[in-house]
Image (cartoon, rainbow, N blue to C red):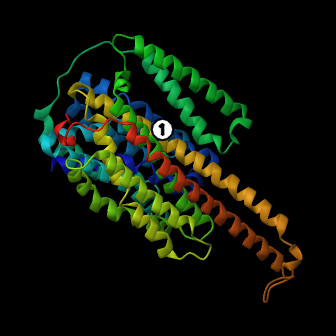
Amino acid sequence: MAAAALAFGNFVVVLDTTIANVAMPTISGDLGVSTTEGTWIITAYAVAEAITVPLTGWLSRRFGEVRLFTACVIAFVICSILCGLSGSLGFLVLFRILQGFAGGPIIPLSATLLISVFPKDKSNIALAIWGMTTVVAPIFGPILGGYISDNYHWGWIFYINIFFGLAVSGVAWWLLHNRETPISRSRIDIVGLLLLVVFVSAFQTMIDKGRELDWFSSSFIVWMAIVAAIALGALILWELTDDDPVIDLSVFKNRTWLISTLSLGLMFGLFFGNIVLTPLWLQQMMGYTATWAGFATAPMGILAVVTAPIVGRLMGKIDPRLIVTYGMVVLAISFFMRALLNAQADFMSVAIPMFVLGAGVPACLVTLTSLGVSELPPEKIANGSGLQNFIRIMAMAVGASLTSTYWENATKGNRAELVAIIDPTMAPASLPGLQPGSGLAAFSRMVDMQAVMLATNDFYAMATILILVFAGVIWLAKRPKGPLQQVSH
């Protein structure tokens, strides 16, 4: 019961990173704002969540892991209710910020508490359960968001958190309050906290708004990049010299943690770019609704659920670097399958590569998460897990933004090349049953469709090569001295 509650707590928070994406146009229209303004609904949550995730270790030391987890889940539920009740964009953005603040610590805490619940020789099973929810939640987000916005009031994308959140907090406190971790009162590192807020806010805003404002051709994006760079440099210098830093950067000295986290960031950035691109392509070119685009990507969850526990068991018997390599090779196969698709691809042609993808993601996510914290002392696990999740979330944002930018630019470039080599006189003047001139319009739409398809193929061909290159990074890590669960925690 404790494992189910903790895993579901993580599921609900991760779900909320994607559930509002497809509902955003509906919310914007209902609140009377433009779609561009409505993107702040997504940015606000991402910024707030990214700020509190790396603070988890420090917050746990001050308040205790169980107490902090329970309080954050309850706060998350309250903020979800307020989001659903919001009648203006200003209030919705405010409550999404508060929701992100509450949700951030739940992600790493759900992992560390799961580890504490399971016996040491089964800690990898705990992380497998956590990894499974982390992989599956972003898939269900667009499906639920699309279905709710198509059939109900958009507020229900937030109200669905109420029952599950209260159940998670109740069960977690009931079963885990006697496992509370020691509390140490210390001064608050105000400077470090402020620098973290400035860096994350500037960086996330730059990433989210960069594509919309044409990146560094916008003075706003340039200033956001400058502020983010200065704040990050100052944050690192301050935290390395402060006696009681809000973020303990000493975990970067651990080679295993560093390489695992780097591999996880690279892999998850590319994976999440794929999660963002597939529904976009299906809706904009293939004529899918948001709900059906979600169904086409959902098969990934099948093998993710099946293989996550298997990966957890194999980590105690096989070199984890081999498991990660296998996972990235499976991702490469899935990407390559989609690089061969054409504009006549049917539902199964899309669903099967997504099904294959599900067999590779847990092998990467679960193994890299477990390997990353395997050599950290117990008092640094929450901090190491928090920083690892912070880098993963930042990689997701970068991957999604760069993928969308590349796809749009490649589409424009491909269209220009196609137009340059096509003779427009080849198009019929009109089509039967339609107005004169309809033939040229239909011809133009065909060119657009092929330009988008070529851009999609190009992305997946490039992703196939990149993921195979990323597979080599994990081999820079030291081989564990024994089975992973024996050196963990």
The amino acid at mark 1 is Met
| Residue 140 position (above or below residue 1) | below
| Residue 346 position (above or below residue 172) | below
Residue 425: percent from left, percent from top: 89, 77
Q: Residues within 10 Å of mark 1 (few under 14, many from 20)?
A: many
Q: Secondary structure at mark 1?
A: helix
Residue 371: percent from left, percent from top: 29, 39
| Residue 283 position (above or below residue 104) | below
Residue found at x 24% / y 49%: 318
Q: Quadrant of the C terminus?
A: top left
Residue 487: percent from left, percent from top: 19, 36
- In depth, the one of 78 and 321 nearer the eye is 321
Residue found at x 54% / y 53%: 465
Please give the count of numbered marks on the rendered protein. 1
Disc 1: which residue: 394
Residue 463: percent from left, percent from top: 54, 54
- In depth, the one of 453 and 192 nearer the eye is 453
